Image (tube, rainbow, N blue to C red):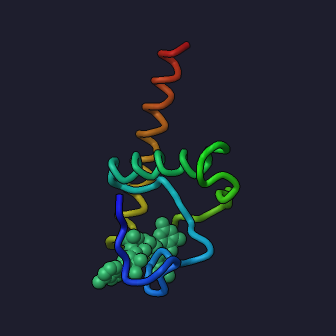
Amino acid sequence: MTVLDRFPPASSIAAGNHVNKIIRANYPDTLYAELATESIRSWRDPAGIFAGLYHRCGWLLAALGGGSSLDFTEGSIKTAREKASSQRKKSALRM
Ligand SMILES: Cc1cc2nc3c(=O)[nH]c(=O)nc-3n(C[C@H](O)[C@H](O)[C@H](O)COP(=O)(O)OP(=O)(O)OC[C@H]3O[C@@H](n4cnc5c(N)ncnc54)[C@H](O)[C@@H]3O)c2cc1C
């Protein structure tokens, strides 16, 4: 694969050009939640290319008042519950 970029790494205009990023798997959209979970698995892999870079930290998902922020938060909680329930069922089937 050849990557062409306007600037050498780390590109000064890239949104991804930061020392720290917070990654989470909580999204209302199941596909996003699945992709994030897969990505976190790679970041946490002690034998992977990101070894030593991932650190668990606390975070807070909150919304003020109504509107899209509250919808996002409630949707994220709903998806997380569904994911947890599905994982519990899979674990029970494996036993
Ligand atoms: C302040 C800030 C904080 C953020 N915090 C988080 C966070 O905590 N967690 C999180 O998950 N996300 C966070 N995000 C969002 C996340 O950084 C972006 O969604 C992600 O980096 C986007 O990646 P990208 O590769 O699409 O774009 P970018 O990282 O922006 O990369 C775009 C690349 O394209 C190159 N480019 C631009 N124009 C051209 C051109 N004409 N020709 C060739 N190359 C070009 C640039 O040089 C750059 O390297 C944050 C974003 C910002 C701005």
Q: Residue furthest bottom?
A: 12
Asked if 49 appears above or below 4 in the picture, the reply is above
Q: Where on the picture, by quarter, is residue 2?
A: bottom left
Q: Quadrant of ligand 1?
A: bottom left
Residue 12 or residue 92, whichever sits in front: 12
Asked if 64 appears above or below 77 in the picture, the reply is below
Which residue shows up at 61% across the image and 63% down it? Answer: 59
Which residue shows up at 48% across the image and 74% down it? Answer: 16
Q: Quadrant of the C terminus?
A: top right
Which residue shows up at 46% across the image and 33% down it? Answer: 85
Residue 91 appears in the rendering: yes
On screen, residue 67 versus residue 77, left or right, reads: left
Please state the horizontal and vertical placement of residue 79, each as a whole percent of the image: 40, 47
Q: Where on the picture, by quarter, is residue 69?
A: bottom left
Q: Quadrant of the N terminus?
A: bottom left
Please state the horizontal and vertical placement of residue 17, each as a whole percent of the image: 52, 78
On screen, residue 82 versus residue 19, left or right, reads: left
Residue 16 or residue 86, whichever sits in front: 16
Which residue shows up at 52% across the image and 22% down it? Answer: 91
